[in-house]
Amino acid sequence: MRPKDQTNWMLTDAIEALARAERLHQSFLNLHPRAGGSEPSWEPPMDVIETEEEILILVALPGVDPDEVEAALDGGTLVISGRRILPAELRNARILRLELPQGRFERRITLPTGRYTISRFAAHGCVGLRLGKSS
């Protein structure tokens, strides 16, 4: 490969990586009004893991108290919602960089058919939801 071709290849690869990162960032911050409301909300990333006894959901919500997160079943859909706000002591501070989304969040996930008991916990910057399967 000639040096000029290698430079073009590296530049093209770098531009494509930046474009992928921008698409991911935009999908993470996909602000949309909730159903029946006009306030936009963002969707936090989450992991969903199922065992024979439960469904475990980890939602990336650093700084959010698990007790302030609403989790409700709407038919076969779990709706996770709440707010992430700056702590009161930082509201008058000069912001140098603000990358973590603030404001209302909402995330919906379709669950397998069944009955569940829901409990919350905090784990390493995530809010955890444990959906115990019941008969």
Image (cartoon, rainbow, N blue to C red):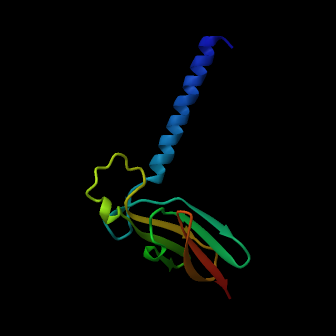
Is residue 12 shown above or below 81?
Answer: above
Q: Position of residue 95 (x, y in %)?
A: 32, 49
Q: Position of residue 69 (x, y in %)?
A: 45, 73
Total labels: the figure holds 0
Q: Position of residue 119 (x, y in %)?
A: 56, 80
Q: Position of residue 11 (x, y in %)?
A: 55, 24
Is residue 54 shown above or below 61?
Answer: below
Can residue 114 be seen at all in this image of the molecule?
Answer: no
Of the 4 image quadrants, the one containing the N terminus is top right
Q: Residue furthest left?
A: 92
Can residue 12 be seen at all in this image of the molecule?
Answer: yes
**Camera-side residue of 109 and 88:** 88
Going 43% across and 53% down the picture, which residue do you hit?
29
**Camera-side residue of 117 and 109:** 117
Direction from residue 7 to residue 91 in the image, left or right: left
Direction from residue 128 to residue 102 in the image, left or right: left
Q: Residue furthest bottom?
A: 135
Going 42% across and 59% down the picture, which residue do you hit?
42
**Camera-side residue of 129 and 126:** 126
Going 55% across and 35% down the picture, which residue do you hit?
17
Of the 4 image quadrants, the one containing the C terminus is bottom right
